[in-house]
Image: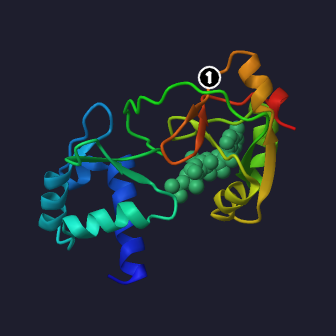
Amino acid sequence: LTENQTTHLSKLLSYILRHKPGEYGIVLDENGYANVDELIQRLNEHHVNIDFATLQHIVDTNNKKRFAFNEDGTKIRASQGHSVGVELGYTEQQPPAILYHGTVEKFLASIMKDGLQKMNRHHVHLSADTTTATKVAERRGKPIILEIKAGEMFAAGYAFYLSANGVWLTEHVHVDFIL
Ligand code: HQG
């Protein structure tokens, strides 16, 4: 498989497992898992050439570890980023004092008024390092990196979750906690 093909399949998997399982005849369980055999079969029916070895390769090599198998390897899910309603079951955790959010200029006025909103996803996504936040922002243009006083938020009672692939998640960031 070329890198391009792997990236293409990874994007398709993100699309299906986070946003539109029904479009490919997939049903996610309440925790966001798709049955592996069924996923491969449905994809093949939709003329997507993928087998178990390829799926395993994508899970293993994905640059952001976007996907994870369940314990016995019969099911697969996206580790974060969903717009469909799933319960990922992450436990609350104490975040580092500062987390980062990468965004772009055109959203700033709105963010400084309403705080960080989760928009179409389940949570606001925050990064532990500026390199990751910069990559997130670069999807949209020239990066603007906001520093979030996560430690103070946590002390004030706001819940934080750490996804299986290291993304910090929270419901909303009030402007008071944006540096
Ligand atoms: C912005 C990718 C106006 C926010 C990334 C962002 C990440 C507001 C956009 C993950 C706002 C939402 C998530 C407000 C927030 N007014 N704009 N009040 N509050 N925004 O894609 O954080 O590669 O839902 O700044 O790497 O960009 O797909 O969130 O620009 O980890 O695995 O609204 O998605 O991961 O955009 O990205 P998104 P995000 P993957």
Query: Label 1 belongs to which residue?
Result: 159
Asked whether, in this view, residue 82 is left or right of residue 168, the answer is left
Q: Quadrant of the C terminus?
A: top right
Asked whether, in this view, residue 19 is left or right of residue 161, the answer is left
Residue toward you, 78 or 112: 78
User: Which residue is pictured at 75% across the width and 16% down the height?
Assistant: 156
Indicate the position of residue 74 as horizontal and vertical percent values: 19, 47
Q: Is residue 65 above or below residue 115?
A: below
Asked whether, in this view, residue 62 is left or right of residue 146, the answer is left
Farthest front residue in view: 72
Asked whether, in this view, residue 55 is left or right of residue 89, the answer is left
Indicate the position of residue 18 as horizontal and vertical percent values: 39, 47
Helix, strand, or loop for circle 1? loop
Indicate the position of residue 109 as horizontal and vertical percent values: 81, 43
Question: What count of labels does the image hold?
Answer: 1
User: Which residue is pictured at 23% across the width and 48% down the height?
Assistant: 73
Residue toward you, 50 or 171: 50
User: Which residue is pictured at 50% across the width and 26% down the height?
Assistant: 91
User: Which residue is pictured at 32% across the width and 39% down the height?
Assistant: 32
Mark 1 close to ligand 1, CB under 8 Å? no
Q: Mark 1: give few (<14), some (14-19) or many (20+) Cα within 10 Å.
A: some
